[in-house]
Image (tube, rainbow, N blue to C red):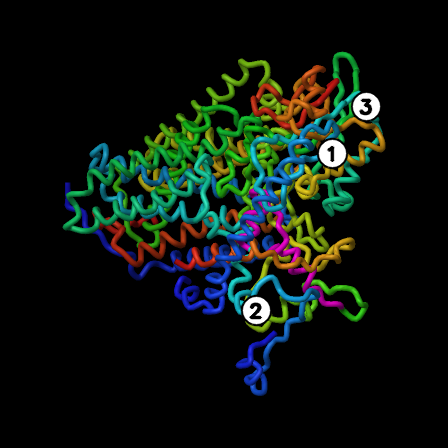
């Protein structure tokens, strides 16, 4: 392999040598650009609405941000499935025709207290835990948590063993049971790998909010997306002011998805 | 004590060739099934988003557990210096490797992306017990290969003792690791117990011995010779009784400790009484066919010499059936019980929250699982033909076989 | 696209003719692209998936958007067509490409702007990476 690369076109090497000057200049340019973008980045962090803090496309995500979701169960109407539809549309999941094997990244769960008869209906998706069991058990490291708290599957190294699905306490993951066609360019998915809610990572990286949250804004307004690490974000203010809960908090996984009035 | 002479399997009876053909056919069917599943996706199996591990895993885990147990005879002879078992040490080591390979083949061919096996071998997450197991399995094969070498090569014999100890310790770690695959799943109530590791070790003793006995008896028939003396047959019988009882003990303790905690009443009721197929498999197959029946067969009065061996082989087969049933109840039953996402609540959703998992195994996945057994048997059979694994202690031809 | 040597050979040997991209020039030199496009994609893939780095110069989506080939219906063809940009060469070289089991092989509906301009810094950083890998 290295042999081939050493004889790689001389032109490429020359180009690289020539490029040193350019690179330096480019690097400096990049630096100033970063500073410029950093400054509004800071002000953007102060934005109350769930708008994602601007990050240059060339910057890696950092743990300064922890993306979170807040779902106000009392505002989630019983029959409404707008968030589910929006997710399916956004990520190319299609309608569920085979409930046992079709993927569902987000689902409406109805919970009834048998002793009081109180009924609630609300969405459940990947809870984006701070200590995700799926990441612990994954033999290849395909299941991973991004620095900003989003739990993802690197489908390039997922071997489809499904141990993460065994480990997830929230039934949040689906296995792709059949060959797929016509995937969305920004949401690759394929047979033989495990997948789950990505918190619409492609939108978040683009400074937008997840599709479910966006759709909910025009129906129940039950969902808030934002940076849990930023004390000035709307989500931080709410979780600081009102009682919220995490599903199966007893497991100590610290999910990034919180529920209000559950 | 006579000196043991080892030899290859030469000019076996037709019976042996029939078995070879059978196993080749099963392996062919298993490989076609794997291709079918790989080509169409797991939609052609009974596995789904709730029961994510199915029949292939039942067989794979069963074989891997049995593999470490198959080494027992070798360990008893080397580590605990019981010379009666010494003639079978080589065979036991070889069988252990073959069972492990069979189990791993099934596990690998069931992956969603078996083409990425190289990724599993090169990219590790060391927090995962699964990743550790990959090392434990490879190490097991390597250590036993070395162990066999020290048994078979005159110059290496002085390393036999330390390698035997290493192999013994390694097999205990390996079964603990396999049991822990399930024990580490905090969210699944049926698995959330540290008792799974010792339960798997106890199971490995019983299944490994049952496989060893069956292979020995098959070899007797293939060679039309008596490889085991009546005394050894009696010892194997006693060991099998003991191991089956140990499995019963850990099974009882596991259920009793769970029954003590109110939060586990739901899952215990599901597995022991109300869960449909799972309690049925537990009581009728695992306990009835796989435990009570072999115990009766083994403890009843032994009189006719040939009948003793016949009973031992039938009991071994029953113990193996019980073992598969045990894995079925643990692996599939444990997943079928609904995840308790909202404790104390009644839950429903389009994704089957709160509902018992549905699972009916399809033919391809069963064939893939059974293929593992055939791989192990074929591999041992061929190894016995290639190298000197079989003992020759008693040359009187066996009339009853 | 093809070097002079290959042009001469084309008289005797059939040579693949991958479709030209829509932009002015590719993100890197043709020779480099031929030899290292898979490494560029792998490098970019790890950066994007794990670190959220979404520069467009070496993204697979960028390649697909720029090198889309229109079929008879004037819409971009997908990987099932032998005219697909990737397939023209990969079929010829008999190298299996499995990107498109998961990734879209044609531009998305709203996604035809593309044709990412080569970004000097990206190119330099990548050639550093490729050089380093060879050692």
Looking at the rendering, the stretch of residues picked out in magenta corresponds to C42-70
Would you identify the image quadrant in which residue C23 lies?
bottom right
Residue B399 visible (yes or no) = yes
Classify 10 Å Cα crowding around label 2: few (below 14), some (14-19), many (20 and above).
Answer: some
Residue topped by disc 2: C30
Q: Chain of mark 1?
A: A
Dot 3 or dot 1: first in sequence order is 3
Tell me the crowding category of disc 3: few under 14, some 14 to 19, or many 20 or more residues within 10 angstroms, Cα based.
Answer: some
Rendering coords of residue A15 (x, y %) = 50, 64
Tell me which chain the residue with mark 2 is part of: C
Q: Which quarter of the figure has residue C67?
A: bottom right
- Residue contact at pointers 3 and 1, CB within 8 angstroms: no
Q: Residue drawn at (85%, 31%), measured in percent from left and top?
A: A219
Relative placement, left or right, of A48 versus A3 is: right
- Residue pictured at 54% horizontal, 54% vertical: C42
Residue C50 part of the magenta-drawn span: yes
Q: Are marks 1 and 2 in contact (CB under 8 Å)?
A: no
What residue sits right under mark 3 in the picture? A75
Q: Which mark is residue A107?
A: 1
Residue at the far bottom: name it. C11
Looking at the picture, how far across and down is residue B98, in whole percent? 38, 49
| On screen, residue A185 above or below A207 | below
Same subunit, labels 1 and 2: the answer reads no
Residue A55: percent from left, percent from top? 64, 40
Mark 3 or mark 1: which is in front? 3
Left or right: residue B259 compared with residue A181: left
């Amino acid at each position: 392999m290295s042999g081939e690369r050493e004889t790689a076109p001389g032109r490429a090497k020359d180009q690289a040598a020539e490029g040193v000057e350019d690179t330096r200049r480019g690097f400096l340019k990049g630096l100033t650009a970063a500073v410029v973008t950093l400054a509004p980045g800071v002000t953007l962090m102060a934005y109350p609405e769930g708008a994602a803090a601007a990050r240059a496309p060339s910057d890696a995500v950092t743990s300064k941000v922890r993306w979170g979701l807040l779902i106000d169960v009392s505002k989630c109407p019983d029959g409404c499935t707008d968030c589910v539809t929006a997710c399916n549309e956004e990520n190319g999941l299609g309608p569920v025709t085979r409930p046992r094997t079709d993927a569902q990244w987000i689902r409406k769960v109805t919970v009834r207290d048998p002793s009081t008869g109180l009924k609630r209906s609300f969405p459940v998706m990947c809870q984006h835990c701070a200590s995700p069991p799926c990441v612990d058990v994954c033999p290849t490291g395909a299941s991973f948590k991004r620095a900003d708290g989003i739990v993802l599957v690197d489908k390039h190294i997922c071997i489809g063993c499904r141990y993460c699905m065994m480990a997830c306490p929230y039934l949040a993951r689906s296995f792709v049971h059949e060959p797929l066609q016509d995937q969305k360019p920004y949401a690759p998915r394929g047979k033989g790998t495990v997948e789950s809610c990505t918190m619409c990572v492609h939108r978040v990286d683009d400074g937008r909010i997840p599709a479910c949250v966006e759709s909910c804004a025009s129906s129940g307004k039950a969902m808030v997306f934002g940076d849990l690490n930023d004390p000035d974000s709307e989500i931080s203010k709410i979780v600081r002011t009102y009682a919220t809960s995490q599903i199966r908090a007893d497991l100590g996984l610290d999910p990034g998805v919180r529920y209000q009035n559950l | 004590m006579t000196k043991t002479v080892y030899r290859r399997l030469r000019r076996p009876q037709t019976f042996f060739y029939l078995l070879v053909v059978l196993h080749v056919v099963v392996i062919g069917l298993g490989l076609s099934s794997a291709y079918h599943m790989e080509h169409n996706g797991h939609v052609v199996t009974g596995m789904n988003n709730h029961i994510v591990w199915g029949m292939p895993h039942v067989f794979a885990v069963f074989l891997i557990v049995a593999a470490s147990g198959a080494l027992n005879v070798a360990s008893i002879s080397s580590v605990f210096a019981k010379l009666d078992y010494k003639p079978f040490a080589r065979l036991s080591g070889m069988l252990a490797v073959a069972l492990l390979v069979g189990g791993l083949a099934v596990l690998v061919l069931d992956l969603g992306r078996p083409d990425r096996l190289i990724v599993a071998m090169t990219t590790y997450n060391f927090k995962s017990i699964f990743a550790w197991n990959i090392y434990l399995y490879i190490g097991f094969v390597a250590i036993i290969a070395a162990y066999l070498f020290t048994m078979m090569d005159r110059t290496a014999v002085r390393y036999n003792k330390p390698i035997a100890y290493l192999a013994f310790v390694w097999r205990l770690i390996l079964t603990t690791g396999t049991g822990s695959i399930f024990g580490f799943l905090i969210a699944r109530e049926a698995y959330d117990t540290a008792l799974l590791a010792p339960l798997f070790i106890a199971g490995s003793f019983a299944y490994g011995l049952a496989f060893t006995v069956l292979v020995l008896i098959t070899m007797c028939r293939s060679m039309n010779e008596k490889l085991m003396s009546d005394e050894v047959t009696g010892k194997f019988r006693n060991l099998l009784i003991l191991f089956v009882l140990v499995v019963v003990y850990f099974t009882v303790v596991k259920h009793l400790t769970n029954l003590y905690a109110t939060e586990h009443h739901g899952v215990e009721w599901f597995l022991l009484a109300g869960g449909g197929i799972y309690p049925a498999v537990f009581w009728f197959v695992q306990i009835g066919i796989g435990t009570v029946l072999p115990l009766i067969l083994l403890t009843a009065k032994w009189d006719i010499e040939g009948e003793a061996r016949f009973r031992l082989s039938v009991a071994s087969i029953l113990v193996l059936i019980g073992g598969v049933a045990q894995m079925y109840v643990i692996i599939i039953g444990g997943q079928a019980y609904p995840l308790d996402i909202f404790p104390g609540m009644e839950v429903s959703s389009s994704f089957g929250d709160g509902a018992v998992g549905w699972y009916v195994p399809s033919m391809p996945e069963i064939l893939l699982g059974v293929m593992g057994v055939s791989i192990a048997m074929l591999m041992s059979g061929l190894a016995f033909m290639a190298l000197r694994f079989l003992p020759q202690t008693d040359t009187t031809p066996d009339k009853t076989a | 696209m093809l070097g002079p040597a290959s042009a001469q050979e084309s008289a005797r040997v059939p040579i693949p003719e991958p479709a030209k991209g829509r932009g002015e020039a590719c993100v890197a030199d043709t020779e480099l692209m031929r030899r290292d496009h898979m490494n560029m994609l792998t490098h970019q893939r790890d950066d994007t998936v794990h670190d959220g780095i979404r520069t467009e110069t070496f993204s697979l989506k960028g390649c697909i958007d720029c090198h889309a080939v229109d079929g008879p219906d004037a819409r971009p063809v997908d990987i099932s067509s032998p005219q697909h940009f990737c397939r023209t060469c990969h079929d010829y070289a008999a190298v299996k490409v499995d990107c498109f089991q998961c990734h879209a092989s044609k531009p998305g509906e709203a996604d035809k702007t593309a044709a990412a301009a080569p970004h000097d810094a990206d190119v330099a950083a990548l050639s550093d990476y490729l050089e380093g890998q060879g050692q």
